[in-house]
Amino acid sequence: MRLPHKTLERKLFKDGYRQVIGVDEVGVACLAGPVYVCAVAFDEKFFQKNHRKLRYLRDSKLLLPHQREKFFNQLTKETDLKFRISFSDVKTIDKLNIYHAARSAMKRAIEKLKPVKESIVLMDGKGKIAGINQEQRAIVKGDRKVFAIACASILAKVARDRVMRKYAQKYPDYGFEKHKGYPTKLHNAQLVKFGPCEIHRHSFAPVAKLL
């Protein structure tokens, strides 16, 4: 299995950047719940050290829940990085559409970091983020290729999963603790049986047809 590497980040620091920011979003394909975004800022000191406990870190989708929690806890202990998490709620998603809601959360997460002038943003996907002053680089499958983006994916995923487990207590009929809002067989069956709840995305077709 190929792990995300730190080659790009090290090259960017050699090119004169003082800060590298990795950004990723979680929950785009869900039928319920918010979309979460994490922006992680690294300085060069981080990439000069050997982080044994982060050795097998990779895209959150390739990790088991207990592995994500382990890496989340380790990342939050690191002193040479800082991160901020933002989200767009269901009302925002239905108003703007999921793409623009996620991009809005990305912009807010980056702004919360208060980036230094000589910084660059690396994000997963194709399109760049509107309205930020930093130089950007969009990387297809970046969460599988670039260490900084993989870190952001884990931090965002764990934060969102924790929120969805809380929603599971408030809306126990849907099994949110199991599928976290994704359109699984269980979720689709419960959605048909009980109808949409307050955190379902009305703008998504499987929900809209039940309204």
Image: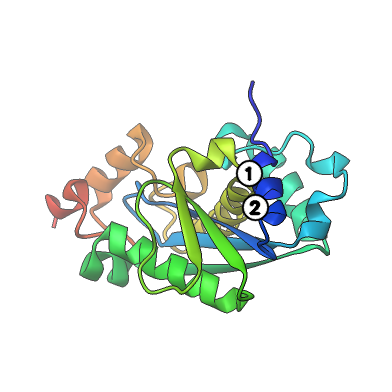
Measured as percent of width and height from the top left, residue 89 is found at 38, 69
| Residue type marked 2 | Leu
Q: Considering depth in this image, is 210 or 77 the residue closer to the camera?
A: 77
Pick whichever, 113 or 198, lies toward us.
113
Q: Nearer the viewer, residue 38 or 179?
A: 38
- Marks 1 and 2: CB-CB under 8 Å? yes
Q: Position of residue 90 (x, y in %)?
A: 33, 66
Residue at the image position 38 percent from the left and 70 percent from the top? 104
Chosen colour scheme: rainbow
Disc number at residue 12?
2
Which residue is pictured at 31% across the width and 44% down the height? 190
Residue 182 or 7: which is nearer the viewer? Answer: 7
Mark 1 sits on what residue?
8
- Residue type at numbered disc 1: Leu
Element carrying mark 2: helix
Q: Residue furthest top?
A: 1
Above or below, 9 against 130 in this view is above
